[in-house]
Image: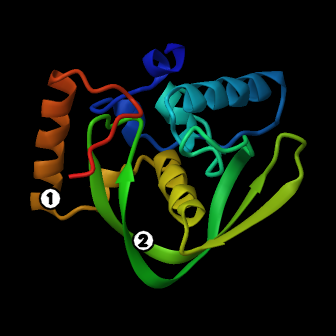
Amino acid sequence: MSGMKDIVCAPDDRLMTECAPIERVDGSVKALAKRMLKDMYASDGCGLAAPQVGALVQLVVIDVDHADGEGSKNPYVLVNPKVVVADGPERTTSEGCLSFPGISVEVSRPSHVVVEARNLDGDLMRYEAQDNLLAVCLQHEIDHLHGITMVDHLSPAKRIAALRDYQEAVAAGALPGETSTE
């Protein structure tokens, strides 16, 4: 699919880079958001951050309703998102990432999150999620904007194992959107 070849995969310095805030939502930002949504859907992802398509700006797209490729599309576009609350008991879930095809890893994150961001109309939006895929996805994608990937949340030994599994998966032909449940 066309979106898969646009996805930046590890190891790539752009995935470890702090992204610049977007100063103004203009046509280029709207076009980038549209492209990101297209790439996310083509790769059967539920979220995508701008550095994952090579753009080092603070832009995220999310659609957890369409996560399995079956539901109706209900995308969120977040410009300059900021986590303003991350609390609640830690929750461990299996996470995959379009930039790490072929693997999934167990990541612990706060179970409750509140995020503020602008939408494409420039309106300030507030998103709140608890104990669900949206809570995980918001934190995962916003991490990307700060150069943090899911493997950065692992202990050194688990990180080494995950990166070895990733290298093996890529060598076996894994593509963005494919994850392992092992």
Q: Residue at x 47, y 76 (%)?
A: 110
* SS assignment at label 2: strand
Residue positioned 29% across, 62% down in the render: 106
Q: Is residue 151 left or right of residue 16?
A: left
**Nearer to us in this view, 173 or 116:** 173
- Dividing the picture into quadrants, the one containing residue 105 is bottom left
Q: Is mark 1 on a helix, strand or loop?
A: helix
Across and down, in percent, residue 102 comes to 27, 36
Q: Is residue 58 above or below residue 151?
A: above
Q: In the figure, is residue 25 to the left or right of 84?
A: right
Which residue bears the numbered disc 1?
158
Q: What residue type is labelled 1?
A: Lys
Q: In this view, does 35 lie to the left or right of 17?
A: right
Instruction: Tell me what residue is drawn at x 83 percent, y 23 percent.
Output: 27
- Residue at x 65% of width, y 50% of height: 65
Residue 109 disc label: 2
- Which mark, residue 56? none
- Asked whether 174 or 77 is in front, the reply is 174
